[in-house]
Image: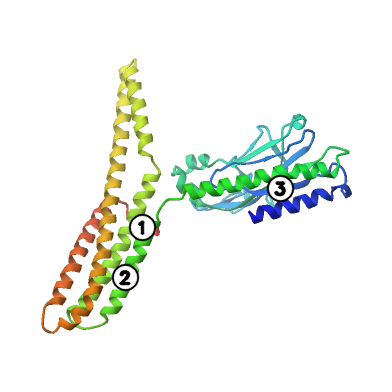
């Protein structure tokens, strides 16, 4: 909010000084960042007869194809901005670049001719779906691959004989819209962020307890030393299992089970109403494919629940081991208590190794790398 307030104050100051500027000179009213996730931003002039323009500046990069984009062009194989693209959507329809400065990555758009009689409502967005179709990648992967900074600036030139107060009054609602849109985009991003905190917190606790247990065990020879090595394996196995839990959640986020069920119901109705055998068979094949999708989603959910229980078991085993360590040291010379402790850790390791092996058989190699 502080940033938006500063923009508001600066814009009002510029408006109050407009009497000393030549009439008809375009000047910036507000500047907002254009989200790279496809979220649209709106900038509106509220007075008829105001000559409005929209300037888009900056660049962003895409990790999938390794290229850099500005509002109208992207780099070719030699790194030059020579390939035009149509990812930037500017409304009202018919808005076109009036000025193109490829070196500075600055493009000035004007609304369609004749629209000055009405207030201009510019809406700007990146069409992420075009990249999804081009790369044949999930939308979430495409969005996460984009990084950079595109800015959208609204410029206006008031009609002749306008007074300074009119310009100041124009700036207030425009900037309030910008503040509202900024808060809305921030809220949507937070709402869309996948919920991994419970997994990462559990992983971090296991990591910390594993390191503490190894430190408390020390470098004693014999079975106690072997226990330290097993505890290290336990921590490493838990790290991999936590990565797979996150992978399961990300996979489920790409496809909503309720939506698939509704599609199946719609396809069933279409199959029942089909007036030809080939169409009915195509519908049945589509239904069968979507049912496989549901089965996969359910299997992911079941495995996720199993893995979370296994991680909880690892944390419990580490807690119990650390509580027993003082007793183990006292009884070490007279009993086989250390052998019992190693056996308990071995049971947890065996369960971890089993689910990790099952997951590796079902997922491509390296698919969980870098998740956490």
Other-residue count near label 1 (Cα within 10 Å), few / some / many at <14 / 14–19 / ≥20? some
Q: Secondary structure at mark 3?
A: strand
**Mark 2 to mark 3 CA distance (whole Å):** 52 Å
In the picture, residue 342 is in which quadrant? bottom left
Residue under the image location 34 percent in, 27 percent down: 265
In the picture, residue 203 is in which quadrant? bottom left
Residue 6, above or below 295: below
Residue 102 shows in the view: yes
Instruction: From the image, tell me which residue sits under label 3.
Output: 30
Dot placed on the residue nearer the N-terminal end, 2 or 1:
1
Q: Secondary structure at mark 2?
A: helix
Instruction: From the image, tell me which residue sits under label 1.
Output: 199
Residue 229 shows in the view: no
Dot placed on the residue nearer the N-terminal end, 2 or 3:
3
Residue 135 drawn at (x, y percent): 47, 44
Q: Nearer the viewer, residue 41 or 114?
A: 41
Q: Nearer the viewer, residue 13 or 109?
A: 13
Residue 146 drawn at (x, y percent): 53, 51
Q: Is residue 330 toward the left or the right of residue 201 in the image?
A: left
Q: Is residue 7 toward the left or the right of residue 205 in the image?
A: right
Q: Secondary structure at mark 1?
A: helix
Dot placed on the residue nearer the N-terminal end, 1 or 3:
3
Q: Is residue 276 toward the left or the right of residue 190 in the image?
A: left
Q: Tell which tag, 2 or 3, sits nearer the viewer.
A: 2
Query: Which mark, residue 209?
Result: 2
Residue under the image location 66 percent in, 55 percent down: 3
Q: Nearer the viewer, residue 132 or 219?
A: 219
């Amino acid at each position: 909010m502080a940033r938006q307030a500063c923009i508001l104050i600066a814009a009002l100051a510029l408006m109050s000084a407009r009497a000393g500027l030549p009439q008809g000179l375009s000047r910036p009213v507000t500047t907002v960042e254009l989200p790279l996730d496809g979220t649209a931003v709106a900038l509106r002039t509220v007075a008829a007869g105001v000559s409005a323009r929209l300037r888009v500046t900056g660049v962003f990069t895409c990790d999938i194809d390794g290229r850099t984009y500005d509002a109208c062009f992207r780099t070719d194989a030699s790194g030059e901005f020579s390939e035009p693209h149509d990812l930037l959507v500017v409304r009202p329809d018919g808005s076109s670049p009036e000025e193109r400065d490829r070196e500075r990555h600055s493009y000035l758009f004007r609304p369609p001719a004749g629209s000055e009689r009405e207030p201009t409502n510019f809406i700007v967005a990146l069409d992420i779906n075009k990249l999804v179709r081009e790369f044949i990648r999930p939308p979430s992967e495409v969005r996460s691959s984009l990084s950079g900074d595109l800015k959208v600036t609204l410029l206006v030139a008031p009609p002749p004989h306008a007074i300074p107060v009119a310009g100041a009054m124009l700036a207030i609602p425009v900037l309030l819209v910008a503040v509202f849109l900024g808060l809305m985009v921030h809220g949507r991003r937070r709402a869309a962020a996948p919920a991994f905190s419970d997994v990462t917190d559990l992983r971090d606790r296991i990591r910390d307890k594993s390191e503490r247990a190894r430190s408390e065990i020390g470098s004693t020879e014999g079975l106690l030393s072997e226990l330290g090595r097993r505890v290290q394996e336990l921590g490493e196995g838990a790290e991999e299992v936590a990565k797979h839990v996150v992978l399961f959640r990300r996979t489920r986020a790409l496809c909503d089970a309720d939506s698939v069920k509704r599609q199946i119901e719609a396809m069933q109705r279409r199959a029942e109403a089909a007036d030809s055998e080939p169409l009915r068979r195509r519908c049945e094949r589509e239904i069968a494919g979507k049912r496989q999708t549901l089965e996969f989603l359910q299997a992911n959910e079941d495995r996720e629940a199993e893995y979370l229980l296994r991680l909880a078991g690892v944390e419990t085993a580490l807690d119990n081991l650390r509580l027993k360590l003082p007793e183990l040291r006292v009884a070490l010379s007279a009993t086989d208590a250390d052998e019992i402790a190693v056996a308990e850790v071995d049971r947890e390791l065996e369960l971890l190794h089993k689910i990790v092996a099952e997951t590796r058989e079902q997922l491509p190699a390296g698919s969980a790398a870098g998740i956490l």
